[in-house]
Image (cartoon, grey):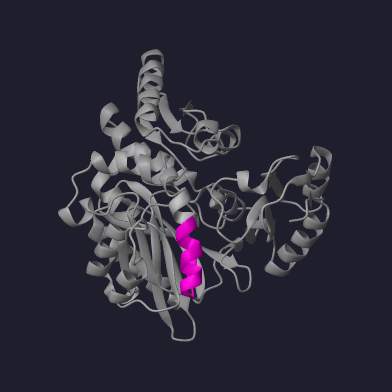
Amino acid sequence: MPKNVFVVGLNELNHARLKRLRGVEDVTFHGVIDPTAIYDTDVWDIEAMLAEAEERIAGAAGAAGTVDAIIGYIDFPVSTMLPFLGPRFGVRSVGLEALLKCQHKYWSRLVQREAIPEAVPGFTWFDPFEDDVLDRIGAAGLTYPFFVKPVKSSGSWLGFRIDTSEDFAVAIEQIRAGIGTIAEPFDHVLARADLPGAIRAVAGHACMAEQMIGGRQCTLEGYAQGGEVVVYGIVDSIRYAHVLSFSHYLYPSRLPEPVQERMRELARTVIAHIGYDDAAFNVEFFWDEIRDHVWLLEINTRIAKDHCDLFEQVDGVSHQQVTVDLGLGRRPDMPHREGAFAVSANFFHRVFQGDATVERCPTPAEIEAAEALAPGTRVAVHVREGMRLSELPEQDAYSYAVAQVWLSAEDEETLLTNYARVLEALPFRFSET
């Protein structure tokens, strides 16, 4: 029988990717909620979005006949909608409490510490609107440098390295101004969950302070099904020197295999301890090479969409294969090293300056010419002429990602050479600040 898979936030690019997966000849993909309603807004009305999704799925199901899976590949708010939509239509979904044990950063650290305490740094939570917050953080045993972020965030949004009290004052001002964007809709999700008392007190407007960890960063992409936890790929997350902004994601990882296996075992242990099942995840780690110590940074309840092209180029299909197969109750049919290239990367072209106006962007013809410079190249420009850099959503505190460039090659040296050539062919200009 034909299968109907409903994808929350489906766009044209990902629709094409999904249709290239294995075993989807009998699958029809239906979009649920226009992705512009997710990306191009400052306010997420979770209740309204759930109502819209339910109406769309019910209407399409009436015409198509079945609802066989409901999936997504976007972080908040999509990932938090799936545990509500799955039970509503009788399809597979991770449980809400298990999902929140990953997404609520304070709750997540508590359960991580239960399972793998050696990989968890010192941490505490705080209310950013209280006075004397620094005293509270110090009383918890944290010293400079430490990192602060909301208990629910996306990417590196409102995350700050704190080296001095002056750094903290600047960070708190920005957190207080912006935290409501995610905190308020996240509170709607928390209100529908069965939370322990210690977590009910730490609502969406709360923040985390964590002892600073670092080293070589990577992301383990995996899934849990029927109680089995599988890691199928590791992607390196490479930062610009001396700042927290990402330069590029590189697949496959260059970390030593024994280190990768230690990370796999830690991921298997903590995911099983949480009870997370029937869904994809990724876990971010640091390897402190000097001390030979592995730290867990955070757990995400989805595949990383920025890694889709990397898996397709190196392994043969996007790792959306895992999401679709899990939704349909199939064993994930993820190939390994069956792609056209040996290495692949997703580069972030960033502007390291204050807010500015975009005065010049590459034209469609210039983008096409840049993509033609090397095989396996795709360019996505995130800005338009006349806009302010501060209008870009989900940016870190230190730079603006104005474009992404996906590249693939036979080795890393060729990859980096090709990126320099492509970047030179993409003319941007910004106003002085």
Q: Quadrant of the C terminus?
A: bottom right
Count every numbered label the image shows and give the total.
0
* Percent coordinates x, y for residue 215 in the rendering: 50, 76
- The reply to whether the magenta stretch includes residue 166 is yes
For the residue pair 39 and 86, the one nearer the viewer reads as: 39
- Residue ID at (67%, 52%): 355
On the question of residue 93 being in view, the answer is no
For the residue pair 164 and 110, the one nearer the viewer reads as: 164
Answer above or below: position of 21 versus 249.
above
- Residue ID at (72%, 69%): 413
Start and end of the magenta stretch? 158-173
- The reply to whether the magenta stretch includes residue 217 is no
Q: Quadrant of the N terminus?
A: top left
- Outermost residue toward the left in this view: 197
* Percent coordinates x, y for residue 249 in the rendering: 58, 60
* Percent coordinates x, y for residue 264 in the rendering: 38, 67
Answer above or below: position of 197 versus 27.
below
Q: Quadrant of residue 418?
A: bottom right
Q: Is residue 408 left or right of residue 74?
A: right
For the residue pair 49 and 375, the one nearer the viewer reads as: 49
Answer above or below: position of 327 versus 308.
above
On the question of residue 94 being in view, the answer is yes
Answer above or below: position of 225 versus 343.
above
- Residue ID at (35%, 43%): 186
Q: Is residue 251 left or right of residue 150?
A: right
For the residue pair 3 and 310, the one nearer the viewer reads as: 310
* Percent coordinates x, y for residue 64 in the rendering: 41, 17
- Outermost residue toward the front in this view: 131
Q: Quadrant of residue 144?
A: bottom left
- Outermost residue toward the bottom in this view: 290
